[in-house]
């Protein structure tokens, strides 16, 4: 009985460590206004809780930039091109974004943010690639 309890304990400990393992999120983005491009990102869990926020530099639309973090089994990512490098999303008179942006899983809502469920993607092992097609608010 003690052997079974010990094996169960070590198995649960192993699963816990696996769940907390740091992973690589690979980000790439096409349709930036210019390259190199500065991309702001936020990785969120399935409830919208922020997991990591930051900026990456993309030299081209084919380049994949690696971000190391603890990913949940499903997650979402929102990005925008910080074209003027002022570290904020520039907005127009009606609060519409003036810079290109995108959401994971190709989620898109004109003049708004899609539901989190539409943005969710599954973690694929220790390295998950998410590609974004940056769009302007006028793209439909």
Image (tube, grey):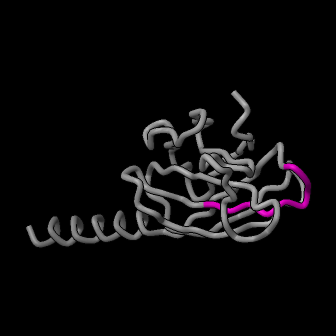
Looking at this view, name the residue that lies furthest to the front. Answer: 93
Q: Quadrant of residue 133?
A: top right
Residue at 84% x, 60% y is: 37
Name the spot of residue 80 as percent of width and height, x first: 69, 54
| Position of 49 relative to 139 (above/below) | below
Name the spot of residue 111 as percent of width and height, x first: 59, 37
What is the number of callouts on the image? 0
Residue in the foreground of this view, choosing between 101 and 8: 101
Q: Magenta includes 39? A: yes
Residue at 8% x, 67% y is: 1
Residue at 91% x, 53% y is: 34
Looking at this view, name the residue that lies furthest to the left. Answer: 1
Residue at 43% x, 39% y is: 117
Judged left or right of residue 47, residue 122 is right
Q: Quadrant of residue 20?
A: bottom left
Q: Quadrant of the C terminus?
A: top right
| Position of 67 relative to 31 (above/below) | below
Residue in the foreground of this view, choosing between 94 and 89: 94
Looking at this view, name the residue that lies furthest to the top. Answer: 140
Name the spot of residue 53 as percent of width and height, x first: 58, 68
Q: Magenta includes 134? A: no
Judged left or right of residue 100, residue 104 is left
Segment colored magenta: 33-41
């Amino acid at each position: 009985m003690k052997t079974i309890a010990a094996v169960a304990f070590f198995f649960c400990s192993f699963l816990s460590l696996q769940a907390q393992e740091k992973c690589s999120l690979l980000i790439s983005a096409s349709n930036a206004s210019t390259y190199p491009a500065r991309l702001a990102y936020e990785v969120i869990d399935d409830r919208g809780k922020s997991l990591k926020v930051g900026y990456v530099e993309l030299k081209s639309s084919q380049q994949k930039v690696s971000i190391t973090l603890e990913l949940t089994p499903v997650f979402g990512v929102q990005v925008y091109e910080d074209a003027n490098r002022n570290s904020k999303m520039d907005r127009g008179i009606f609060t519409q974004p003036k810079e290109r942006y995108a959401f994971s899983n190709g989620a898109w809502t004109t003049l708004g943010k899609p539901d989190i469920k539409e943005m969710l993607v599954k973690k694929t092992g220790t390295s998950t690639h998410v590609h974004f097609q940056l769009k302007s608010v006028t793209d439909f």
